[in-house]
Image: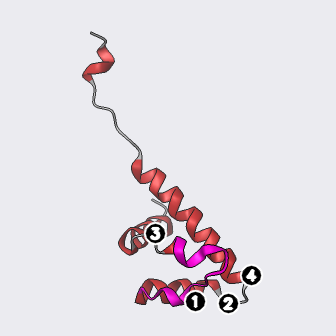
Amino acid sequence: MDNLDNYTRKFKIAIDKDAEIHQILTTVYQALEEKGYNPINQIVGYILSEDPTYITNHNNARTLIRKIDRDELLQVLVRRYLGQ
């Protein structure tokens, strides 16, 4: 039996999830900017209210942002802000 079979493998799901959230937020930000909105204000409005109408349908941004769990999004934002 190979010694590697005796170890538990760890998956880096959190890192993958963070990357996915980053990509979605970047796409949403760009879509809002292209439509002439203030992206920060709109995203904050969405986060606080969870009302998808804060996000434009342009480039499928509204559908994309709804794929992110709000709690996960807030955790990622706080971690990034604090540099962790």
Query: Which residue matches tag 4?
Result: 34
- The residues tagged by marks 4 and 2 sit, at their Cα atoms, a distance apart of 8 Å
Name which residue type carries label 3.
Lys
The quadrant where residue 11 appears = top left
Picture colour scheme: secondary structure
Name which residue type carries label 2.
Tyr
The quadrant where residue 39 appears = bottom right
Query: Which residue matches tag 3?
Result: 67
Question: Image point 73% across, 89% down: which residue?
Answer: 36
In the displayed structure image, the side of residue 55 where residue 9 appears, left or right: left
Question: Image point 57% across, 70% down: which residue?
Answer: 25
Residue 54: say if magenta.
yes
Question: Image point 28% across, 25% down: which residue?
Answer: 7
Name which residue type carries label 1.
Asn
The quadrant where residue 26 appears = bottom right
Which stretch is magenta? 50-64
Whether 67 is drawn above or below 51: the answer is above
Mark 2 or 3: the one toward you: 3
- Going from N to C along the chain, the mark reached first, 2 or 3, is 2
**Nearer to us in this view, 42 or 77:** 42
- Going from N to C along the chain, the mark reached first, 1 or 4, is 4
Mark 2 or 1: the one toward you: 2
Query: Which residue matches tag 2?
Result: 37
Crowd rating for badge 3 (residues with CA inside 10 Å; few <14, some 14–19, many 20+) = few
Query: Which residue matches tag 1?
Result: 41
Verify CB contact (< 8 Å) between mark 3 and mark 4: no
State the image coordinates of residue 40 (x, y, percent, origin top left): 59, 84
